[in-house]
Image (cartoon, helix red, strand yellow):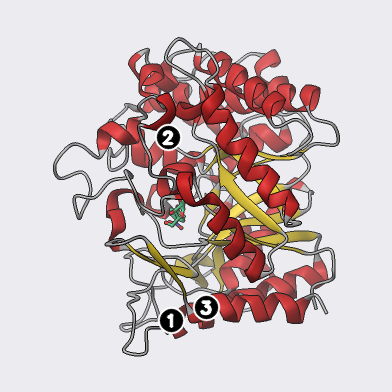
Amino acid sequence: MFNKDFIFGCATASYQIEGSIDKDSKVLSIWDNFTKIKGNIIDGSDGSIVCDSYIKYKDDVRLLKNLGVKAYRFSIAWTRVIDENNNPNQKGLDYYINLCKELLKNNITPYVTLYHWDLPQWIMDKGGVLNDEISDFFAYYTDVVTKALDGLVKDYITINEPQCIMHLGFRVGAHAPGLKYTDKEMLQAIHNLLLCHGKAVRIIRKNVKNSTIGFAPCSRPMVPVSEDKELYDKCYNKYFELVNDYEFPNRVSIYSDPIFLGDYPKEYYLVFKDILPKITKEDLKLISQPLDYIYQNIYTGNYYSLKDNELVKEDFYFGYPEGNIDWLQVVPKSIYYGVKYLNQRYKLPVIISENGFCSNDFISLDGKCHDMQRIDYIKRYLIELEKAFKELPIKGYFYWSLFDNFEWNSGLSKRFGLVYVDYRNGNRIEKDSYYAYKEIIEEALK
Ligand code: PNW
């Protein structure tokens, strides 16, 4: 059983839920522009309304309160709180101050993600992640936010899913800003992103009393098909292998080794010797300041077996259980092995910052949303997490997401929520999974 201190929460992100993309002098983000280009978003939708959380945040908190979660992970839109002259925007800050106050009034702890993909367009115009200055911009933004939320927030996550930022946004161009960097540019940009993290950590530690800090990559852990020790070790090594493109979004070590172990993996310097960015000792020191948790977003994984002593990836059989989005096979053990590998290598307590299921939800004749598959998914994954919890320090679990929202290049066509959103009228309807998660939380914390 999870204990009373275990943090059950829900997660969201600014561009995916807030709407009001031009209210209160908010400036444009790369997603505001990317969604305008025909063909970029499957259903042609954008973030202009979605869950309307900028207006309805009190209703968001009511939903969280009734759900019984202890924590709410949301992200701040850089574009709301800093203007194009790099000055603070008090109206934007007020929104987050009010949201935090409302959460705390209801005994819900805010977990703030500083960067969940909505880069200000004006920073992109100056070169974005390839501009060395980006880490100073990010540090300044962090300084403004942490001071504005002083006394309200102590738990910060610097960056969400660096692999998705870099690979989807800057390598294959499926996400904003839709670019296709070379290997050399990728390495430079990744290093700059890690410096953003490092400078933000320094600021948070300075400004926030008793802060906890982490960053939240994603991964698809290798799941051994049996409990063979050799297979386990090979899966572990594969998980941290330097580059395994076909296993996107892993690349765990290139992002997490510098942060937790103080340097890129040895092979990095060999494999990329001709295209290395400039990496100084000071950089690595900055990047590897101590953190409190290993956050990780885990949704799925792949099975592996041994054939003639070689690690072999198993194909999913025809008709294998999967969600309503092409990458989401139901692999409950991915969460067990993921936290085990991460804790073994980086030796810190783990928090699952995202885990969730996408199904083809709709409202039934009785006016309710019967999302049986999501309930099954959550239960299966929590059984595995609980197994890990008995063996390792695991502090929490955030379900993605509180409500259906803007699923990036899939637009409004994909639903991950515990709460159904009717995009015609903004109505929010608690799904069966909302009540099931509520029951799980009550049961677990008894
Ligand atoms: C996350 N995978 O992305 C993002 O943080 C959210 O913004 C997003 O809405 C949510 O998951 C659902 O897609 C992921 O391949 C992208 O395992 C890819 C994977 C996992 C999460």
Q: CA distance from mark 1 to mark 3?
A: 6 Å
Decide which of tag 2 and tag 1 comes sooner along the chain.
2
Residue 433 numbered mark, or none = 3
Residue under pointer 1: 371
Q: Give the mark nearest the N terminus, 3 or 2.
A: 2
Q: Are marks 1 and 3 in contact (CB under 8 Å)?
A: yes
Name the amino acid type tagged 3: Ser
Query: Dot 1, how many residues are within 10 Å of its Cα: few (below 14), some (14-19), or many (20+)?
Result: some
Q: Residue at x 25, y 40 (%)?
A: 35
The amino acid on which the numbered mark 1 sits, given as a three-letter code, is Asp
The residue lying furthest to the left in this view is 38
Residue closest to the eye, 130 or 12:
12
Q: Circle 2 — which element? A: loop
**Ligand 1's quadrant:** bottom left
Q: CA distance from mark 3 to mark 2?
A: 29 Å
Q: Is residue 368 above or below residue 327?
A: below
- Is residue 387 among what the camera can see? yes
Neighbor class of circle 3 (other Cα within 10 Å; few <14, some 14-19, many 20+) is many
Which residue matches tag 2? 118
Q: CB atoms at circles 3 and 2 under 8 Å apart?
A: no
